Amino acid sequence: MKNERRLRIMTAEGEVRGTLDDNLFVFRGIPYAAPPVGALRWRPPQPMTPWQTVRDATVLGRASWQNSEYCVAAGGGDPGPFSEDCLYLNIWTPDIEPATPLPVMVWLHGGGYTIGAGGLPIYNGKPLAARGVVVVTLNYRLGHLGFFAHPALDAEYPDGEPVNNFALLDQIAALQWVQRNIPAFGGDRRNVTLFGESSGARSVLSLFCSPYSRGLFHKGIVQSAYSVPDVPRSQALKTGVAAATHFGLPNASAEELRRLPAHDFWPLGSDLANGPVPIAGDVVLPQPMLATFRAGKQHRLPLMIGCNSDEASVLDFFGVDATRIVREMQQKKPFSYRLVKWLYDIHDDVLLGRTLARDMAFTVLTLLIVKAQHDIGMPGWRYWFDYVAENERDLYPWGAWHGNEIPYVLNTLSYVEPGMKTRPYTAGDYAFSRTVSDYWLAFARDATEFTHTLPGELPWPAWHPGADLTLSLGEKGKAALALKRNFMKSRLRLCRLMMRAMVRL
């Protein structure tokens, strides 16, 4: 009877009933905003209408429209049923009534803003919750439903106040829900860590820059964010007009756009879409993310950031031929080519291209952001993930792929299948996962603006330009921890000069 009572939680919007999973309380599919359908498509998320009866919270909410096969192949699994009605979140908590409120970790899934869902097995919050935190995952609008600009929609807003980043507003609405309701689930609304991977990591960075997210979270973890520039609003408007024209609406009204079926958008090609980045220039993200960090105008909050040793594994999905880029450099900029070969000491163009693309598209951003943190007097921690599962090392000769760190961070190796069933995860893999996740949990529990070192198997000092220390989680695919001084400093200095000219996604 006691457990049954504790499975029913009263939120600001109404009562929900969850379930127990090994003494953890789990609540799935809780709506955090009104369904963004019909007249609410391409509008900021609206408050839920309160419900009067107990709402079942044992089934995942629907994901935003997307390519299911693509999500299974590259996004972490089957996202389940789709709908425009997709604004749902999930909660795992070890204690509804703890003696002291528990740290809260809010996960933003990746997928290039076109695929993914908060309920994928790899994002299961149970392992971290079992270690003393409240975990929240969520769905948000994807693709054209999440990022869209069109003159007819702009006309609905006061001059100079357009809204185009609806997905970011969804994430902000979820954080507002956390502030209203997480104490009822045992969480500390004053200690909320926002963390995500890939486009989820870009979301964390964007919310560090949005005036609408101020005060809703207290620190951020950025896993494998890419350095692709935000889409200028002027370009997004042209893309929106082109997409409407594709549907036979060259002079579309807002009403005509909202009558288009939601499922017609996700198959559109990249020339008719924004992404895989937000739109810079609306009220949600007034300036490009990187420009905001460079100007020191990001929210003054602690931040952890890092990337993986073979991030170039993802570039194929964006049509980037890294080898071609290097060979074009050899022909058109022979001095730059010779300089790159000398700095990298790599004489195979395939490997050189892969390594250079990784650094320009991912690694350089980690240094730019952590330096921007230091410049405003906020602590930042930089990591490098270079671990590969023991039975899969021959499959990953160049290191950890984009996204490979997720099950180690979330402790979810037991919830995902290895690349081949004949290559199960080992005791060593599970042990290293716990070592890695210890740092994430320490950050969530303890990091403040006054923190200088994170506890762990190897104490991890905040980044400082004098020491320039990066924590290496793994070494050449094997389990190891090391603090690397001046990690890739010369390479990344060159990449900062070449990045804009070389990376075209």
Image (cartoon, rainbow, N blue to C red):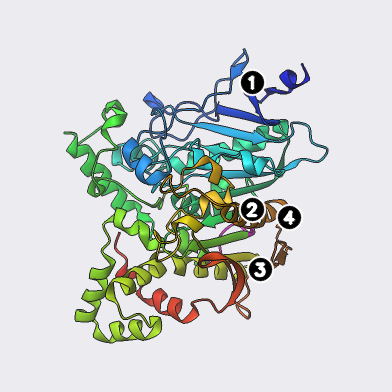
Task: Calculate the distance from the C-alpha at mark 3 to the C-alpha at mark 2.
Answer: 21 Å
For badge 4, the amino acid type reads Asp
**Mark closer to the chain start, 3 or 4:** 4
Tell me the residue that label 2 is attached to. 434
**Mark closer to the chain start, 4 or 2:** 2
Q: Residue at x 55, y 54 (%)?
A: 208
**389 versus 378 height, above or below:** above
For badge 3, the amino acid type reads Ala
> Is residue 383 something that shows in the picture?
no
Relative to 446, 387 lies left or right: left
> Is residue 138 something that shows in the picture?
yes
Task: Calculate the distance from the C-alpha at mark 1 to the C-alpha at mark 4.
Answer: 31 Å
For badge 2, the amino acid type reads Arg
Tell me the residue that label 4 is attached to. 446
- Which residues fall within the magenta stretch? 295-302
Q: Position of residue 245 (x, y in %)?
A: 18, 39
Q: Quarter of the image containing the N terminus?
A: top right
**Mark closer to the chain start, 1 or 3:** 1
Q: Nearer the viewer, residue 134 or 14?
A: 134
Labelled disc at residue 134: none
